[in-house]
Image (tube, rainbow, N blue to C red):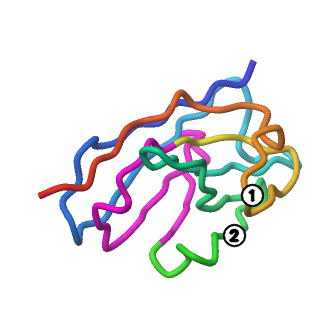
Amino acid sequence: QVQLQESGPGLVKPSQTLSLTCTVSGGSITTNYYFWNWLRQPPGKGLEWIGYIAYSGNTYYSPSLKSRTSISRDTSKNQFTLQLSSVTPEDTAVYYCARAPLPPDIDVVPTQYDYWGQGTQVTVSS
């Protein structure tokens, strides 16, 4: 059974960089052919896909967030990390990590993901 767990600060100041880590257990993030994703859900809105890091280490980001997003991994710890720079209050959301067996659509289709973390609230405020 694969499990994902998000961790990181719950409060970030405007203009700073948000950094979250997803720790994976029960499966390796280098196993063919899975895609390890970050998504978020702002209050009162739907899920938004942020980007993924593939089993190969390749990354792909949402065009709307690409200029501020970086996803990396630490294979020795079986973790992958999201960094979102220059945050504003509009980046306040519940952030999720999730696994997909195929490259997911930019418009989120929840059934394209087979395992999810529980989500972590991040608030951007001074």
In the image, residue 72 lies in the stretch drawn in magenta: yes
Q: What residue is shown at x 66% (from left), y 40% (from top)? A: 98
Pinpoint residue 96: horizontal percent, then vertical percent: 54, 41
Residue at the location (79% across, 33% down)? 114
| Classed neighbour count for the residue bearing mark 2: other residues with Cα under 10 Å, few (<14), some (14–19), many (≥20) | some
Q: Residue furthest left?
A: 126
**Residue receiving disc 1:** 54
Are the residues flagged by discs 2 and 1 in contact, CB closer than 8 Å?
yes
Q: Residues within 10 Å of mark 1 (few under 14, many from 20)?
A: many
The label number, if any, that marks residue 110 in the structure image: none
Q: In the image, which disc is placed on residue 60?
A: 2
Percent position of residue 106, x then y: 74, 63
Q: Decide which of 125, 100 is in the foreground and name it.
A: 125
Is 63 above or below relative to 6?
below
Q: Secondary structure at mark 2?
A: strand
Kindly indicate the quadrant of the structure image that contains residue 12.
bottom left
On the image, the x and y values in percent for residue 58 come to 72, 67
